[in-house]
Structure formats: C-alpha cells, structure tokens
Image (cartoon, rainbow, N blue to C red):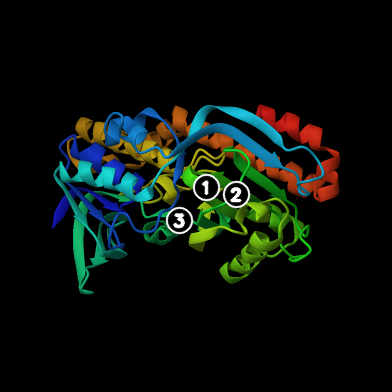
C-alpha cells in the first residue's frame, strides 16, 4: 500500500494534519494504537483559536464548552501565608469533554478520503538510502504490515516511536507529571489554580524535587488536577527525578495533606489518575530530523507551556507543516523532491519564523526563566514568600 501522507498517531495533531491534507486532495493514512479515538484523554482544557472552527466546523468547540474562565490564581509554597496572586487572561480557558472533542474529529475524518486504522501500532520505519519511505505496523491480529508514503508525520505524542527512531532525546524535553480527573471537588472560585512547590518543602516528601501543582475547575464541581516535576530545576539542584511509582505515592499524600490543595480534593472522587510525561522545556528546532519524516505536536515538544494546552498548538503545528509541505511539493517536479537538504533547511527555517512557533518558543523561554528564578535562585519556601510581591510583578508581565 502507498499513500501521499502517513500520520503515526490519531491525536489532535495527526487528525488535524490528515484533515487539512485530505481537503487538498492528498491520500492519507492515520495509524493509531488505541482501540478508540475517545480513549485516554490527554487534557480537557484549552484556549480558543480560529483553527478549532477551521478543522472541526464553525461553532463546534463553543457548543461543547462545559465551563469557561479567564481567572488565573497562583499560590505561594505555604498557601495560607500570603495572599494568592490573581489576574485575568485575555482569552478564556475552556473545559470540555474529551470524548465529545474527539468525536468531532471523527466526524470530519468520516467525511473525507482518510484511512484510519485503530488498534494498530507502528513498530518500525522503512528506510531507503537515508530517507524514511514508510512504516511497519502491527494490525489487531499482531500481523506486521508495511505501508509506504511520500511523507511520514510523527504525531504519536510524548513516547513517539518515530521520534525515538530518529534520535530525539525526549528525556531532556519532558517533565514527569501525574494527571487526574476528579468529581465532587471543592473550590471557592472558578479560577485555574497553580501551586509553587520548592524542592524538599513538603514534610511528607522531603526528597521531592521542585514541582508545580495545578487544579482546573470544571462544571458541577468536577476538575482536572496534576503535579508536574520541573526536571531541569531538579537536575540543577541535585535532586533525583522521581519514578512514576514515587510520583504517584507523593501525589496521594498531596491529595491528603498539602495545604489548600488537599482541601479541594480530599472528598473528591477520581475518574482517572495516571503518571505520564509532558513537554515543558522548549520546542525542537529541527522538525525534520531525517529525510522523509516530520515531527508534529508533542512529538516535537510543541506545547504552550503557559497553560494554553498542547492540543491547540499541536493542531496549528500540523496545519502549518501540512500546508507548507504541500506547497513545496506543488512547486517540485516530484512529490519526493522536497527531501533535498536545501529544501529541508528552508522548511525548518520557515517554521521557526512563523508566528505560532515564535509564540510557543517565547512562552517556553519565559516559563524556563520563571522556574529558574523561583526554584533555583530563590530555592526555598521562605525566600519565595519573602519575595512574593516580586513574583507577583513577574507573573503580571508573564
């Protein structure tokens, strides 16, 4: 079998890319290891951008909104010691249901000439000379099948088989995180809440590295909550990055004991709690690490770390790259002529100068600087609280 474009992974980036390409006449294959698009939510909050109307249909995202707020709240390491920092974002954070969100993608896929394979896992790449020309996947029966494509898009997330095959070091790009979805939580405002946790500041976990906890209220006292280890700060301070098992153990103690945070969650009922990884350092600069393949979304560490979610940014990333590849192919004699070194360099540079890349990169740089100041330079709860007004001023700019 042969396709114009192969997308490895059927998350928002892969499906957006396939939808944009199919609307321009490209024959697309999407390969997904999950049994259903609705399985395993990666996040259920985002900020609206026009691409949602463009890909899913005008007004579709607005129709599935469960709760919206512009309020953001930051809590000091000892939440009761100083007043929380509160301010309003220019655009609202929107809470939604993952199943409904992905069904909207499915509707668009069904209306187009897109082959979508579920319960099929890519296990290898096919390389001719120095170019990836296809992939090998296992079908639901475990049979290995080869499929060829002019372009392979890696949209398979933070554990990308394609990214790892081409040498991307994800360990340096990702932070360990526990993510949970809860019912019947208790919170006094609809604001999105963030808690700064310096290294060694929790009595019940004295060896725990610096982290950021958050709680995002939703409809009917439901919420999304998490604690994210700031891995780069941890390494600079000499703290070990916890294993998934240790992260889960500390999470359970935080839900039970951490001031203010535990009061919001201690009576709540978990629907999903899992350790995972999240891009939180900076996007890659080389989105074509090998001829024949383009990295998208989480696979390229392309996420809006300020809280805007990786969902929309990954959709914009996919749209940009698919359109750019198609434009370049249309200018070439053959679709595969785009894999000349000079053209690859031109494509990478074009994306790095694109507004969406510059926005994501600037947010990542500001985020890194903020964590450096809080967790490495100030270092302790006492110093952060002593400088709380300076933190407030910095967050207002941020």
Measured from the top left, where is residue 6 in percent x and y?
Answer: 24, 51
Q: Which residue position is annotated with label 1? A: 221
Where's the C terminus, which quadrant? top right
Measured from the top left, where is residue 103 in percent x and y?
Answer: 27, 47
Query: Going 26% across and 32% down the picture, which residue do you hit?
Result: 57
The mark nearer the N terminus, 1 or 3, is: 3
Q: Residues within 10 Å of mark 3 (few under 14, many from 20)?
A: many
| 388 sits to left or right of 398 | right
Q: What is the C-alpha distance between the residues marked 2 and 1? A: 6 Å
Circle 1: element type: helix
| Quadrant of residue 191 within the rendered picture | top right
Q: What is the C-alpha distance between the residues marked 1 and 3? A: 30 Å
Measured from the top left, where is residue 169 in percent x and y?
Answer: 51, 57
| Quadrant of residue 133 within the rendered picture | bottom left
Q: What is the C-alpha distance between the residues marked 2 and 3? A: 31 Å
| 186 sits to left or right of 207 | left
The mark nearer the N terminus, 2 or 3, is: 3
The mark nearer the N terminus, 2 or 1, is: 2
Query: Going 42% across and 34% down the picture, which residue do you hit?
Result: 351
Q: Which residue is situated farthest in the bottom direction here?
A: 142
**Viewer-nearest of discs 1 and 3:** 1
Query: Going 31% across and 62% down the picture, which residue do you hit?
Result: 34
Q: Which residue position is annotated with label 3? A: 158
User: Pointer 2 and pointer 1: residues touching (CB < 8 Å)?
Assistant: yes
| Nearer the observer, 315 or 332 | 315
Q: Residues within 10 Å of mark 1 (few under 14, many from 20)?
A: some
Return the mark for residue 186: 2
The answer to whether residue 281 shows anywhere in this view is no
Circle 3: element type: helix
């Amino acid at each position: 079998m042969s396709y114009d474009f192969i997308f490895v992974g059927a998350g928002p980036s892969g499906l957006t890319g396939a939808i944009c390409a199919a609307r321009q006449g490209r024959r697309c294959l999407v390969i997904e290891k999950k049994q259903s698009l609705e399985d395993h939510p990666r996040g259920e909050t985002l900020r609206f951008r026009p691409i949602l109307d463009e890909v899913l249909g005008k007004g579709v995202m607005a129709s599935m909104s469960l709760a919206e707020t512009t309020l953001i709240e930051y809590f000091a390491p000892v939440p009761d010691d100083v007043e929380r920092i509160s301010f309003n974002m220019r655009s609202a954070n929107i809470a939604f249901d993952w199943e409904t969100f992905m069904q909207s993608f499915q509707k668009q896929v069904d209306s187009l000439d897109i082959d979508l394979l579920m319960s099929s896992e890519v296990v290898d790449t096919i390389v001719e000379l120095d170019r990836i020309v296809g992939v090998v996947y296992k079908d639901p029966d475990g049979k290995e099948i080869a499929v060829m494509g002019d372009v392979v898009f890696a949209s398979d997330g933070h554990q990308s088989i394609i990214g790892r095959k081409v040498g991307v070091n994800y360990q340096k790009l990702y932070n360990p995180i526990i993510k949970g979805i809860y019912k019947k939580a208790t919170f006094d405002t609809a604001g999105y809440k963030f808690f700064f946790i310096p290294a060694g500041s929790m009595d019940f976990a004295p060896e725990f590295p610096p982290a950021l906890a958050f709680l995002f209220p939703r409809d009917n006292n439901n919420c999304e909550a998490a604690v994210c280890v700031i891995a780069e700060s941890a390494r600079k301070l000499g703290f070990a990055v916890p294993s998934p098992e240790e992260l889960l153990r500390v999470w359970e103690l935080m839900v039970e004991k951490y001031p203010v945070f535990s009061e919001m969650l201690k009576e709540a009922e978990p629907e999903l709690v899992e350790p995972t990884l999240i891009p939180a350092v900076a996007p890659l600069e080389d989105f074509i690490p090998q001829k024949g393949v383009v990295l998208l979304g989480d696979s390229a560490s392309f996420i809006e770390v300020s809280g805007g979610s990786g969902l929309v940014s990954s959709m914009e990333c996919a749209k940009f790259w698919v359109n750019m590849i198609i434009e370049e192919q249309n200018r070439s004699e053959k679709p595969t002529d785009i894999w000349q070194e000079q053209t690859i360099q031109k494509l990478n540079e074009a994306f790095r100068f694109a507004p969406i890349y510059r926005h994501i990169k600037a947010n990542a740089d500001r985020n890194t600087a903020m964590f450096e100041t809080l967790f490495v330079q100030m270092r302790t709860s006492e110093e952060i609280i002593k400088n709380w007004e300076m933190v407030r001023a910095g967050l207002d700019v941020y």
